[in-house]
Each structure stands twice: as structure tokens, then as C-alpha cells.
Image (tube, helix red, strand yellow):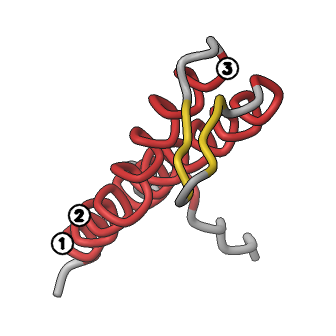
Amino acid sequence: MEKRTIGLIATIGTALSCGCPGLFACIFGAASALGGGTFSLGEQSGNIPRSLGVPILCLGLLLMAIPVAVGFFTLRSKPQPSASDEPIPPSV
């Protein structure tokens, strides 16, 4: 396989495994930080603390940055060595 194909597979894999959960974590974190998050556990229910929404939002942003970084580092074009980069033989 070519390096570019492996890079595309890695980018798509990280987008599905990190990007999508990161997007949902951002939405949930923003809703919780703005006071819209609620929970219900059996007979207990209430609002999720706003201070819990900000770390969830940051975690979601971190998860969404992973596929961007993988795509950047695997799909960038590396400069090709030119003829002037070759060592010059010593003159006699």
C-alpha cells in the first residue's frame, strides 16, 4: 500500500473513532455549560452542574483535534530532495 492510502485510512479511522464522539461531547458540554443538561437515575433527577460542562467541552475539542493532526501529519507532501542537495565531490 502507498503511504497516502495508509494516511487516508488512518485519517478516516480517527475521524470515526475520535471525531464523532468529540463532536457529540462538544454539543453535550456546551449544553451542560449553558445550564441545559439534566439527568435521571431511577428516582433521582436534576440538573448537571455547569462546572462539569466546561471540561466535557474541552475534552470534545481535544478529541476533534486528533483527526486533524493525524490528517496533517500523514497527508502532507514532503519536499523532494533536489539535485543541489547532493554532496559535492572534493576537487583534486
Seen at 55% across and 42% down, the residue is 39
- Give the spatial CA distance, label 2 vs label 3: 35 Å
Say which of 6 and 64 sits in front: 64
Please rate how many residues cluster around mark 2, counting C-alpha atoms within 10 Å: few if below 14, some from 14 to 19, many from 20. some
Give me the C-alpha separation between circle 3 and circle 1. Answer: 40 Å
Q: Give the residue at mark 2.
A: 8
Q: Position of residue 59 (x, y in %)?
A: 66, 45
Do the numbered discs 2 and 1 sit on residues whose CB atoms are within 8 Å?
Answer: yes
Q: In this view, does 25 lie to the left or right of 89?
A: left
- Say which amino acid is labelled 1: Thr
Foreground residue among 36 and 83: 36
Task: Answer with left or right where residue 25 lies relative to residue 75.
Answer: right
- Cα–Cα gap, marks 2 and 1: 5 Å
Q: Mark 1 points at which residue?
A: 5
Amino acid type, mark 3:
Ala
Q: Position of residue 50 (x, y in %)?
A: 75, 23
User: Considering only order in the chain, which callout, 1 or 3, is on the residue closer to the N terminus?
Assistant: 1
Left/right placement of residue 85 relative to residue 89 reads: left
Q: Name the residue under label 3.
A: 33
Quarter of the image for residue 12 reads bottom left
Label 3 close to label 1 by CB (< 8 Å): no
What element does badge 1 sit on?
helix
Percent x, y for residue 47?
65, 29
Q: Which of marks 2 and 3 is in front?
A: 3
